[in-house]
Image (cartoon, rainbow, N blue to C red):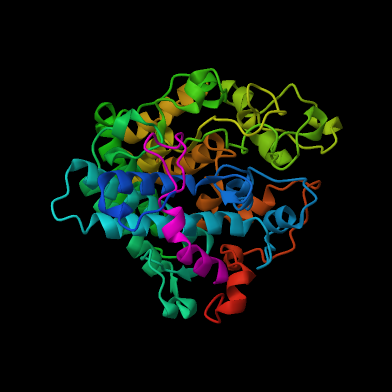
Amino acid sequence: MKKILYLICTAALSVIAGCSDFLTEKTDGQIFSNALETEAGLEAALTGTYKKWSQPWSCGFQHTWPLEVTMGGEDITSNAPSTNCVELDTYAATNTNSSVPNVYRSCYQSIINASSVIEAALKFPDPGDKVKNILAEAYFIRAYDYFWLGRMHKAVPLILSGTYNEEDAMMPVTGTEGIYAQIESDLEQAIALLPDQKRNGEPGRPNKGTAYALRAEVWLMEAGFPLNRGDEAYRKAAADAREVLDNRSKYGFDFEESYETLFTHSVERFNGGVNKESVFVMTSDNANWMYGTAPGPSDLGGWGYIFAETNFYKEFPGGIRKEYTFDESFDFEHSNEGKPIYRKLSVDDGYTMGGTSVAINYLRFSQTALTYAEAKARTDGPDDLAYACVNTIRRRAGLDEYSGLDRDDFVKKCVEERKWEFAAEGVRWWDVIRLDLIQEAIACRASNELPVNGAKSSDNYFLPLPNTDEILNPNINK
């Protein structure tokens, strides 16, 4: 809890450390007591909130940490000697794991800042469109953070204020049901207030379609473990996903035609990683270390943090998608690490560049499409749109289309397609959790993978909270 308390106490400083030109303009650090009482102050505070996601050497979502905490899926592994990667890859994470706090801390930093923005914006007596837009984005940010925390941990402190109170030091944790209730509430507010187009045309901001797409993923997660809300949640997931699919031109999203555009990460080409599928993307000012050096093999000048599991690579359907997902020219069997490497995590097909401005797509239009297909099939059976969603992705991958499947087979194909399409994008592990597929994930492991040390069951679907919080708050990890 010490870290959370520190974050709360310093919120007044960090919340206004931002810029008016979204993530690029520098500020002089001056602080004024009435900063959040003006539109300019709110805008600067919101930018400071976004920046909490891009602190690559302390915490954030622009290093390999978000992938490391999803290593339970069979799509990714690591040969890094660090204990944190080994623990996460073998379902044996401890409360001293050093990767987990980097995501945890980033979430809470932006939660506290977002809460400060929300509190200030709600005090405006007659807010105009700009204040409403700022408020909407702050709600979205807080929802996104708690979605990560709620999937990672069984219970967390539910902080909804940017103001520190002494009793917060012993704040009881809130379980999954309460966390998701807050996510739903924040997304409802975001959807009501967000415009149809991304503000100022900046790809790193959400629009109404982004919030609908995120909520579809929330409902999909709620349908399975641990809440197990079933059909009710699946119907909501299908409805929200369909809203995005039916209004793709209004929201500015669509399928990309080629995997070269989707998976060739380049600073100069392909719009720096932003494309038609970028429903939710994190942009950065030369802060992205997820692609390039960190996941590259040591043979090619990389650090060797993220690889593909051998059998996952071997079972991956051949064709153009596999060619752009993996570097098939790399002789991994005779390499230093002996693991297949992800071409989709390279920068310009290389592994010596880090700290780039390449954007990271955390939610793609194809994911929304497959969410619709699966959720619709699980309730009413697959309709024409569900088939169109799956088959559009399969055609792009050079694979045969599906037709005439019964409901169970179609659902199985949707889940399988998500596994291949979003390999090394942090999606598979959450699917393993919600569908309780840990035995399937373990069975995929080759003999050269790290042996599983932790429990081979849903007991290890949640990660322990950092021990630095546990020491000061007896409610943590109880």
- Residue 54 in the image: x percent, y percent? 53, 44
Q: Residue furthest left?
A: 126
Q: Nearer the viewer, residue 365 or 140?
A: 140
Determine the image quadrant of residue 367. Answer: top left
Expressed as whole percent of the image width and height from the top left, the position of residue 371 reads 39, 42
Observer-nearest residue: 198 or 307? 198
Residue 123 or residue 460, whichever sits in front? 123
Residue 116 part of the magenta-drawn span: no
Q: Quadrant of residue 62?
A: top right
Quadrant into which the C terminus falls? bottom right
Q: Residue at x 39, y 25 (%)?
A: 276
Which quarter of the rendered picture does the N terminus lie within? bottom right
Question: x, y (%) of residue 197?
Answer: 27, 32
Between residues 279 and 321, which one lies in front from this camera angle?
Answer: 279
Eyeballing the image, is 27 above or below 324? below
Is 185 positioned to the left or the right of 390 in the image? left
Q: Is 44 situated above or below 148?
A: above
Residue 238 visible in the shown view: no
Count how many numbered circles sit on residues in the image.
Answer: 0
Residue at left offset 80%, top offset 26%:
331
Range shown magenta: 1-29
In the picture, measured across the screen, residue 248 lies left or right of residue 349, that is left
Q: Is residue 297 above or below residue 64?
A: above
Q: Is there any visible trace of residue 291 in the rendered image? A: yes
Where is residue 93 drawn, in percent x and y?
67, 63
In percent of the image, x 37 and y 55: which residue is there? 114
